[in-house]
Image (spheres, rainbow, N blue to C red):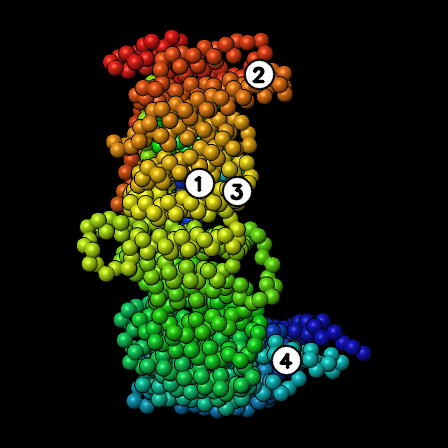
Amino acid sequence: MVLVLAIGDLHIPHRASDLPAKFKSMLVPGKIQHIICTGNLCIKEVHDYLKSLCPSLHITRGEYDEDSRYPETKTITIGQFKLGLCHGHQVVPWGDLDSLAMLQRQLDVDILVSGHTHQFKAYKHEAGVVINPGSATGAYSSITYDVNPSFVLMDIDGLRVVVYVYELIDGEVKVDKIDFKKTSTATI
Amino acid sequence: MISDGIEDEEKWLTAGIAGLQQNAFYMHRALDSNNIKDALKYSAQMLSELRTSRLSPHKYYELYMRAFDELRKLEIFFKEESRRSCSIIELYELVQHAGNILPRLYLLCTVGSVYIKSKEAPAKDILKDLVEMCRGIQHPLRGLFLRSYLSQVSRDKLPDIGSEYEGDENTVMDAVEFVLQNFTEMNKLWVRMQHQHAIGYSGLQGPAREKEKREKERNELRDLVGKNLHVLSQIEGIDLELYKDIVLPRILEQVVNCKDDLAQYYLMDCLIQVFPDEYHLQTLETLLGACPQLQPSVDIKTVLSGLMERLSNYAASSVEVLPEFVQVEAFAKLNNAIGQVIEAQPDMPVFGAVTLYSSLLTFTLHVHPDRLDYVDQILGACVNKISGKGKLEGKTTKQIVALLSAPLEKYSDIDIALKLSNYPLVMEYLDDSTNKVMSNVIIQSIMKNKTHISTADKVGALFELIKGLIKDLDSDGNDEMDEDDFKEEQNFVARLIQMLYNNDPEEMLKIICTVKKHIMTGGPKRLPFTIPPLIYNALKLVRRVQSQDENASEEATTSATPKKIFQILNQTIEVLSTVPVPDLALRLYLECAEAANDCDLEPVAYEFFTQAYILYEEEISDSKAQVTALYLIIGTLQRMHTFGVENRDTLTHKATGYSAKLLKKPDQCRAVYACSHLFWVEDQDGIKDGERVLLCLKRALRIANAAQQMANVTKGSSGSVILFIEILNKYLYFFEKGNTQITVASIQGLIELVTTEMQSDTATSDPAADAFFSSTMRYIQSQKAKGGATAEKFEPIKV
């Protein structure tokens, strides 16, 4: 059982001052094995904070990130799953699932995690899963109205991944979960 | 010959103890045989050891304790003796025959104790007699210990209320009188020590050392004097009336008149510690009245601070006592007292005055948290004190920071601190670096309490306070701040800007304008940090009024319209050109364009796009930056629905032009095929121009071909086929969406092209390309397997 936190688009300090307190109290160091971050942190303090939660931190570059050395895309293998990571502003049209699926094919991954739209999505198609963890701070987005703060926790266990999405709605944390199973061939 | 005082003292102490023990032995022997005369003789001899002048207080105490123990045993004997042979009165007579006065008096006190217990005479008479007789010893050290002994043996025999010694003749007043007298005499002796040489003094040590030693010796004895106050505090019969009318005035009289700073400081402190807080509260005026009369060298501020702290704790202990404070006008009295002390000591350093006000502030926050006027008053007094004093030293500024931080901690709402008119005045006197420290404290308080500053006036006041962070204060710029620290500081300000909010759009707009005014003074270094958060605050406001606009009627005279806000946005982003940060500015222009699009303000959106394009053409020259900027342009443009055909065409044409002109061929190819989406929007009214889509894709194909040829020429082998695979995927995308211009044949052609290239001899192996092609083929298969219209569509494609 491997816990992977998918989080991104915090936009601190341009669009938000901090993570919601309820999220901060849930994210404690030592519980998570990997963090994959879609980007747009934007400053070093946020990077350090995430690093303190878990040393295995993977980030891709968002268009506002202070650190320009983050890669445009990244692939990671965790257990039986290949995960792909990309911020998403490079994939036009933004938020378009078919275009994202193309990126998924290109990276040849089971799960593609991307952001930019600040809207949570978990979409399964024949070749795999596309996940958007949304914005962890509920930051303003020109694409999405009424953004609720959200992040995703993936529990990878063998050929199965359970995706938990945590959303802060009207001050309360709501959790939802989605199950995905992969067949033993190379991709789902 | 220089004698080493300490070694000698040890010698004398040992000798003294030996002598004492020897005589004690004989004394006990005499007692065992009921030989009272001999017993007294030996006891007197024993006590003679206490006549020494050679021991310092510390050592004398050791000797004294041993004598004390022996006297206890003697007392026990006396108790029984009086029942047997001679009466207590006779005994009282007998002991006065001792040759030397000191032993005589010790014995007298011992017998006196038994006498009182026997109740054969009124306690008050005996006590009076004893306390008077002790005057016979005027030597400070010996006198102090003697009187201390008297105090100890009489302790449980005072005619207090409810004690067995109370009666018609003996009252609490007598007990009080006794203790007060003992106290007064002891204090006099103690003070006199200041004018004598220290005991372990050798003339060769010099006056400074000597003074030090003397003070040390005095300090060792202070508890003996203070004990009397303790005893007084334990007398139950002393109620508030008695305390106010007799006890306190007498004590204060002695304290003031002795004119000794060591004694004054210690006794004031002792007084405050031993008596209950309610008493202090009710006698505040008298107590404080003594303060200006003390010696100037007394550290009165510590005493007053101690008092205020006690009273603060008292107030905190229970809510019921708070009305008392109001009733006795505690604040006014303390404030006055502090004022008087400061006036009486014109040489008091600023630090001292600030500390006093700091303590008073803490007191006020505990006792009268609702009285902002008091808090303001204190700050005002502080301003008066520190104005005109020029640069303040480190510890003073620290104290001022503590002073200013206290209200922030107490009132979690920054609003309250902003109401204090003197608060900014105090901050004026901080030097730049301290101003920054304080500003950080203020921001942290706001962040911690998650307070939202809600009016433009408050925002203005706040930004005035924290101006150390907002702009350069002194023109020398002598503080070379570490870059990381500077970033952190400005990011902090950025986060603060997120905390400014009001539901009412009018007010929110005012807030935005106020912030803009302030951050514009920040200079090019600060603008990249402070402008973005302001922009987003404004964009959020646009969203809010945008939905209102749709509902509201045209007559509404609000000035918070999207148009107005966009004007402000435009002006603000323009300022970034002074830094310059074209990448950031471009992104912000595009965000605004999208917001204008949502408001259906075509000209505004077009203007923003124009600005973004100008930046792209003129300011962004780095290849990597160009690629990112271009994707943002394409992505934003793709979502625009407010543009009419002409405007759209102009912008699209430019975008595709930029794409084809990127430096690296692969980048060109990718940007061009991204542009294909500009001609196909899935919305119901969206443009769906299949031909132009195909044109883009074909253009991308040509560029990919050119890239391949270049690779052949320059590297001798064909480059990666990945671009072709990407383009193929785009073909499939639009094919699936129903673009009739994309034929099965064209797709098939591409598939063959890729396959051929991959199998060719000169092919460079690229596992990523292989995987991509495989997954693409699998995609086609899965589409065929879907059934229905999709399957039909994909059926002809051969993989």
Q: How far across and down, in percent of the image, does residue B320 sit? A: 27, 71
Q: Earlier in the sequence, mark 4 or mark 3?
A: 4
Question: Chain for mark 4?
Answer: B
Q: Amino acid at mark 4?
A: Arg
- Residue bearing mark 3: B620
Can you identify the residue that label 2 sits on? B718
Q: Where residue A161 sits in the image (x, y, percent)?
A: 36, 24
Q: Quadrant of the C terminus of chain B?
A: top left
Dot 1 falls on which chain?
A
Please tell me if label 2 and label 3 are on a single chain: yes
Provide residue B192's location: percent of width, then percent of height: 58, 87
The residue that mark 4 highlights is B214
Q: Is residue B15 above or below residue A55?
A: below
Q: Amino acid at mark 3?
A: Ile
Q: Which mark is residue A40?
A: 1
Label 4 Cα neighbours within 10 Å, binned few <14 / some 14-19 / many ≥20: many
- Front residue of B539/B270: it is B539
How far is disc 1 from disc 4 in space, using C-alphas?
Answer: 70 Å
Q: CA distance from mark 4 to mark 3?
A: 80 Å
User: Circles 4 and 3: CB distance less than 8 Å?
Assistant: no
B791 lies left or right of A83: left
Tag 2's secondary structure? Answer: loop
